[in-house]
Image: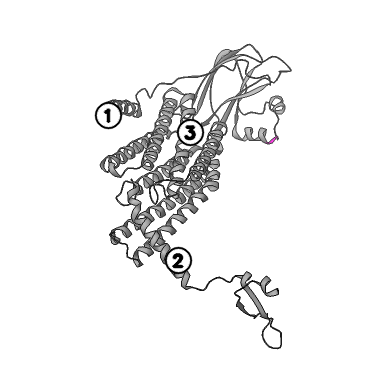
Amino acid sequence: FQPMIQSLTVFVALLFGICSGLIVEKQVSPNNLISKFYTQFDEFGFGEGGTVEISGRSNDTTLRVYICSEDEYRERLTGSLSWSQFCEQNHPKIPFIPLDGKTYSFKIPTKGHYYFGLIDCHRVNEPAFEADLHYVLLSDASGSQLPLGQRFSPFIESAFTGLWVLLLLVSGVFLVKDRNLVTPLHGILYGVVLLRLSVSALTAALWWNYSLFGNKIAFFDELSYLLFAVAEAAFFAVFYLISKGWRITRTGVPASDFRATGTAVGVLLLALMFFSFNNIEYYFLIMLIMYFFVMPKVFSGITVQTSQLDHLVRVWSQIPVPNVDVVRSVSYLMKKRTLLRHARSCAIAYIFLLLAATTGVKVLVPWYNVWITTFVSHSSVFIVTAALCFITRPTEGVFLTSTEELQPFVLAQQLADNQNVEASENALRPWDLTKTLIIEWPTAENSPPEVAIAYEAQYSIEQQKM
């Protein structure tokens, strides 16, 4: 653990702001990027006292930098303000900035979310431009290089990194302590915690780099999305395997169930990866939609498993099972049933907490406090994962570690089946219409029309006709 402790020490040192006064400019070089006359290269949230410093050069002398507010940006999206009108009327509140090698510094007029881009209002079928642009964005008077809505993100991500480390260590202690009761299901869930920790650590490093150096590390950003998608798919796989009773009511899962699990997890993983890399805005919303499609399989599976356990509890309470401690076995069955019910509660809580974080909180919280949405979504993921780790901790009588542990359950099921067979033999046999002969059809005069007098013939109707 010494390398891990050293790494955490360095991270904590960064956490408390070593080099916090360092301001680094960003650089954009959209060489041969476009052939149209505009392109967007950044967006940023400013508070009161936010400042911008821009300098650059281009082979196109008419190329300008535009900075527009969110309202102006939405006008362009809705078509109420075209790019030509944007050029002709000099509509933006902030004038266009030329790329002539000079440095231009100014304050943002009002608090808001702004979009940065390059525009050439005189371009007509000209070749793509080349430009080299340097700029520094400070969100408020304190000189923060983070967008106003993400000003607390480094601290939030660092705090959750610490929580994931704590959960990883506590889960590891339980697994080592009761190593004889550990199953592959515990290994998958432990891997999920490890993936969550990796995502949180990468995101924390990403935001601290943004805070200290003014830009994001693209590799960290993409890797965190990839690991999060894998962690989410593995987390769903744990729910799915629990719903099938894997290592709880049976030691193996049929190949068809494994194929169904792989298909559902694969579809979820592909959807998460596609939308995370293409449209971050709807990432969690798409994840919720996927859960509404695949979670019903989890709920139905858990219902089937709990019904079977309820049946076995009744059997063991009514039928003596030889050479078996019935009291202890019934308590084990009830523990299994409790685990399945708690797992279902965790799945329901996870869906509703993510729904609250992605819709309710996002609608209620303004853009300059978007860190609250991040905190709520991270809290939801951590709480449900920690709860699932707790209820699935290695416990005697809950998880099956060998096929020998299934023998009492198989014996009880056989006794229950035998009892059902005996009861069915003494019950009324079902009416076999092929051996039924109607000897009198009722009429309105002598009996109600729905009543028929019949008896079970010893020979078929065909033989009677002969």
Q: Assign the magenta stretch its main secondary structure.
A: loop
Report the amino acid beneath label 2.
Val
Q: Name the residue located 40 percent from the left edge and 44 percent from the top edge.
A: 385
Q: Are marks 2 and 1 in contact (CB under 8 Å)?
A: no
Q: Is residue 169 left or right of residue 64?
A: left
| Of pointers 2 and 1, the one earlier in the residue sequence | 1
Which residue is situated farthest in the right direction here?
124
Residue segment shown in magenta: 78-82
Name the quadrant containing residue 97.
top right
- Secondary structure beneath dot 1 equals loop
- Foreground mark, 2 or 1, reads 2
Q: Which numbered disc flags the more N-terminal residue, 3 or 1?
A: 1
Residue 263 image point, x, y percent:
53, 40
Asked if residue 8 lies in the magenta stretch, the reply is: no
Please report the residue visible at 44 percent of the width from the left and 37 percent of the height from the top: 231
N-terminal-most mark, 3 or 2: 3
Which is nearer the eye, 450 or 306? 450
Circle 3 packing at 10 Å, graded few (<14), some (14-19), many (20+), is many
Q: Nearer the viewer, residue 390 or 263?
A: 263
**Residue labelled with disc 2:** 421
Q: Which residue is mark 1?
A: 1
Spatial CA distance of label 2 from label 1 is 61 Å
SS of the residue at dot 2?
A: helix
Q: Please report the residue visible at 49 percent of the width from the left and 45 percent of the height from the top.
A: 257
